[in-house]
């Protein structure tokens, strides 16, 4: 399981389990550190390896055989990491750096597209993995997804999506920093310039409702080519994107069967690190960056990972579920 650092300090069964295994004294971050622990709570080693298997083999049979250790389900009040809202909807969010070639055609970005690492092979190797698509999850409450369904749909009917959903996309999910680690960089409400989503009914039958989603989001600075330079340029970060999507709803089962959205956006300005210095993935000008949303189907444990991979993002202090209930 993926464990944010703060869970090691949390009260309750999850924190107790990690502390008993000594995980609170080890690196637990988004940087790829890994530790192996038995179901009985014994520390076995770092990344999965033959050495870890050897340590597991040393455990008594009462701790190794299938079903020997009963792992009980936790009550909601005991969970340090929250689960998706009851009856809610989970969307899988994909993010990726893009690049335009000399003909203006889009392609996946490569390390050599970034001037700050172009002449640094060791840095390119370190960042290569971060240029691959990154995935996280967005949550909608039952009230929110039900608000997307017109009570008496008519072809051509247009409706505005509740502002809280558009704002959540802008603040928590349409942020390019999420492509590097999934966590961090929640956009402040004051930075939101535009966050609008609307739906247009395209098809209506007793069985199915199909809608087109349109929208636009802009947060951060206004683009200024003269200031969008690197490294350490004077322009704060900004991002904007149109949104295009198609939603399909099974009217008999009362459930969404399709929830596809693409956001072909552009990013500019300073990718500041903790010291406000430019990050290696910063590029001069206004450069492409893409997001895609889809319905997270099935009961895979990964589909229950909190937004940003961190349960602390879904709290009253971050206002993730603002003005929804």
Image (spheres, rainbow, N blue to C red):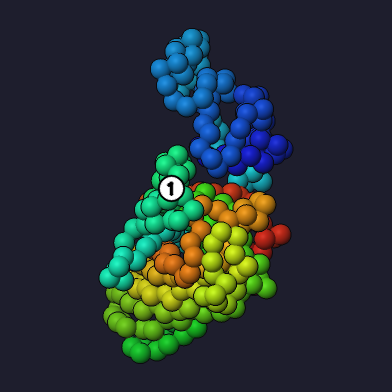
Report the front residue among 282 and 88.
282
Could you tell whether 21 is left or right of 90 in the image? Answer: right
Could you tell whether 4 is left or right of 316 in the image? Answer: left
Residue visible at 64% across and 24% down in the picture? 22
Could you tell whether 63 is left or right of 79 in the image? Answer: left
Quarter assignment of residue 249 = bottom left
Could you tell whether 321 is left or right of 122 in the image? Answer: right
Residue visible at 30% across and 82% down in the picture? 203
Give the crowd class for mark 1: few <14, some 14-19, many >=20 residues within 10 Å: few
List the single residue furthest toward the front: 119
Report the front residue among 87 and 103.
103
Question: In the image, residue 223 lies at what x, y percent?
Answer: 54, 76
Can residue 273 be seen here?
yes
Quadrant location, the C terminus: bottom right
Question: In the image, residue 193 lies at what x, y percent?
Answer: 59, 78
Can residue 238 be seen here?
no
Question: In the image, residue 247 lies at what x, y percent?
Answer: 36, 72
Report the front residue among 45 and 106.
106
Residue visible at 42% across and 79% down in the picture? 214
Helix, strand or loop at disc 1?
loop
Quarter assignment of residue 53 = top left
- The residue where tag 1 is placed is 119
Residue visible at 43% across and 64% down in the picture? 289
The total of numbered circles placed on residues is 1
Quarter assignment of residue 265 = bottom left
Question: In the image, residue 42 lies at what x, y percent?
Answer: 57, 20
């Amino acid at each position: 399981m993926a464990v944010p650092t703060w869970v090691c300090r949390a009260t309750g069964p999850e924190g107790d389990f990690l502390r008993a295994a000594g995980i609170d004294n080890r690196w637990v971050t988004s940087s790829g550190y890994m530790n192996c622990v038995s179901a009985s709570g014994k520390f076995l080693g770092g990344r999965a390896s033959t050495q870890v298997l050897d340590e597991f083999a040393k455990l008594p049979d009462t701790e190794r055989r299938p079903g020997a250790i009963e792992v009980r389900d936790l009550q909601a009040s005991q969970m340090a990491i929250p689960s998706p809202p009851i009856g809610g909807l989970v969307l899988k969010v994909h993010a990726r750096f893009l690049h335009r070639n000399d003909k203006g055609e889009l392609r996946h970005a490569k390390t050599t597209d970034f001037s700050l690492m172009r002449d640094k092979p060791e840095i390119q190797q370190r960042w290569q993995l971060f240029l691959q698509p990154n995935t996280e999850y967005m949550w909608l409450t039952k009230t929110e997804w039900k608000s997307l369904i017109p009570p008496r749909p008519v072809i051509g009917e247009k409706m505005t999506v509740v502002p809280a959903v558009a704002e959540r996309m802008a603040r928590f999910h349409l942020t390019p920093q999420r492509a590097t680690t999934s966590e961090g960089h929640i956009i402040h409400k004051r930075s939101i310039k535009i966050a609008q989503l609307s739906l247009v009914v395209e098809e209506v039958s007793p069985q199915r409702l199909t809608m087109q989603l349109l929208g636009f989001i802009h947060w951060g600075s206004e683009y200024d080519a003269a200031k969008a330079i690197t490294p350490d340029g004077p322009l704060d970060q900004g991002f904007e994107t149109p949104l295009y999507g198609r939603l399909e709803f099974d009217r008999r089962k009362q459930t969404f069967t399709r929830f596809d959205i693409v956001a072909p956006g552009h990013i500019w300005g300073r990718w500041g690190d903790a010291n406000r210095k430019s990050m290696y993935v910063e590029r001069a000008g206004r450069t492409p960056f893409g997001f895609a949303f889809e319905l997270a189907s099935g009961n895979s444990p990964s589909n229950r990972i909190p937004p940003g991979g961190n349960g602390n993002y879904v709290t009253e202090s971050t206002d993730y579920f603002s003005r929804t209930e």
